[in-house]
Amino acid sequence: MAKRVAVFGGTFDPVHIGHLRSALEVAQALKLDAVRLVPNALPPHRAAPNVSAQQRLQMVELAIANEPLLTVDARELKRDKPSWTIDTLISVRQELAPHDQLFFVLGWDAFCGLSSWHRWDELLEHCHLLVLQRPDMQLQAPAAVHALIDNKVATDWQEITSPAGSVVFLQQTPLAVSATQIRALLSEGENIRYLVPDAVLEFIQTQGLYRPV
Ligand code: ATP
């Protein structure tokens, strides 16, 4: 039986309930076997000053520890520079069986900017695109993106039988939380309980992360 796996990339700086609910809802909506959270390497100027890639990874590990549908994949952190999405997808694909289905999860905004991505026109050779749409958004993709997805949109994910090559849209209402907001609260000494899992909160506190430098 073919497996159905999704890749959900992000900086997870830190991981929060918005990421986790979104990933879990994706897993359930498409009856996936797993959603892999893939923390991105950050160029030094974008990294939070006192938080290492290893610590971002550890927070994701703590966050998903009790949820079998979510896994963490550290491959981008093992390289010494930020990875192109296409390279990550090719390397994940190599570990799957030929008939397994691979979905790459991206938000509507990212999808609209897809034509600026490295080797973007090859992405669908390796995965399906799973585009999360916010119900409240004006949906108008640029012409270049339209050309890419022409004839590839699956109105029902259950029709998809191939390992890659389709585009699926999923309506999802994101929780109103962002890592930027969490870092700002922490830098002001505010309480972030309930915005992240308790284990992540405890890690942030014991390691003294996101404090003003
Ligand atoms: P930052 O505020 O630092 O930009 P972020 O909270 O947006 O971070 P990222 O790690 O950059 O988080 O996002 C990873 C992925 O999670 C992206 O696809 C993004 O669209 C999605 N995401 C971020 N916040 C939410 C949320 N509240 N609900 C659902 N998805 C989210």
Image (cartoon, rainbow, N blue to C red):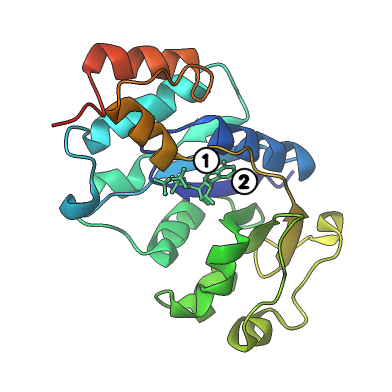
Q: Position of residue 20 (x, y in %)?
A: 57, 33
Q: On the rendered structure, is 144 left or right of 204?
A: right
Asked whether 37 or 172 is in front, the reply is 172
User: Label for residue 177?
Assistant: none
Q: On the rendered structure, is 178 left or right of 108?
A: left
Kind of residue at badge 1: Arg
Residue at 52% in and 73% down: 114
Q: Position of residue 34 (x, y in %)?
A: 62, 37
Q: Is residue 14 visible?
A: no
Question: For the residue carrying disc 1, how many other residues have a C-alpha within 10 Å: few (<14), some (14-19), or many (20+)?
Answer: many
Q: On the rendered structure, is 137 left or right of 191?
A: right
The residue indicated by pointer 2 is: 5
Asked whether 34 or 116 is in front, the reply is 116
User: Label for residue 36?
Assistant: 1
Occupied quadrant, residue 70: top right
Q: Quadrant of the C terminus?
A: top left
Occupied quadrant, residue 200: top left
